[in-house]
Amino acid sequence: MRASIGRGLVLAAAAGLALLPAGAAAADTVAPTPSPGAVTVTKAGTSFITAAQISAGQPVAVGASVGDYLYWSFPAQAGQVHDVAVTVTFPADRKRAGDSTWSVDVFDGLRRRQACTAGAQTPAVAATATRVDLGCTLRAVRSWAEPWSGDPLPGTYYVRLSVAELADRDLGMPVEVDLLVSLLGDEGAPADDGTLKTPLVPPVKAGTILDEQALSPTSAQEDSEDGSWFDGVSFTGWIPDLSSRWIWTTAGGILAAVAGVVGFAMTRRPRVR
């Protein structure tokens, strides 16, 4: 009897120790909250160029339609780790025709899709559900990386919310979208082998003319090296590059001229004296 009681106490203690880390982890997990005093953003873009600009800790609440592509952009610096949380709420007075699959994607300044280390990036939603929660925890931003690696670098990041699979009858249904980009950690610039000279922030104002400061500092040097100079005058742009198109065009013109002269000589009538 005592042995069975002691064994029961040992098993209970072991079960309590096994559940303790999970409880502690659940207690440490806190839902992301907006920054105090942050202004709520009530708009979203429809492309990379028109993406609405937000910052970490700034809440977003917009009304949209099912099937729309929604874009937001936020800045990120080296050493930072960001988490994107999205909630889509469906209208309670309307029934959906079928299940759907939603997707949240994050792109860097070069518009390369970034991998998520945690979060429901493409959850499936039943037709009876009233909401869907999406999330994506990004990797720590590096200060330098190889061009082929695809690692996150400092600059502008884009968030895109879309629906991947949807019943045709549900297209255009109004929904409420809540988004929040949280800063999970900031370790500063890591000790990499190099640093990124310029953040990956592409120009987003379509149709505007870039000034000299926006141009690459090496563009003028490359133009001067590529151009041919004679007596201080540059002929860049005057003489076309001798590509294969120009060679074949010139050769065809010469052959056509020779054929015309030969044909005229063979077909002309002799003069009668």
Image (cartoon, helix red, strand yellow):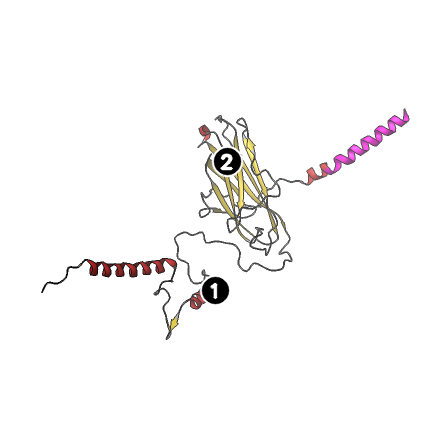
In the rendered view, tell whether residue 67 sits above or below residue 94: below
Which residues are drawn in magenta? 1-21
Is residue 13 within the magenta segment? yes
Residue position marked by numbered label 1 in the rendering: 218
The numbered disc on residue 164 is 2
Residue type at tag 1: Thr
From the viewer's perspective, tell me whether residue 33 is left or right of residue 261.
right
Q: Main secondary structure of the magenta part?
A: helix
**Residue positioned 43% across, 68% down in the render:** 224
Q: Residue at x 51, y 40 (%)?
A: 161
Query: Between residues 94 and 61, which one lies in front from this camera angle?
Result: 94
**Is residue 262 one of those drawn in magenta?**
no
Q: Mark 1, residues whose alpha carbon is within 10 Å: few (<14), some, or many (≥20)?
A: few
Asked if residue 39 is positioned above or below residue 225 in the image, the reply reads: above
Examine the rendered structure and indicate whether residue 163 appears above or below residue 191.
above
**Farthest residue, direction left:** 273
| Residue 13 place in picture, x, y as percent | 81, 33
Residue 109's spot in the image, x, y percent?
Answer: 51, 51
- SS label for mark 2: strand
Amino acid marked by disc 2: Ala
Of pointers 1 and 2, the one earlier in the residue sequence? 2
Find residue 125 and report its horizontal and vertical position in percent: 55, 31
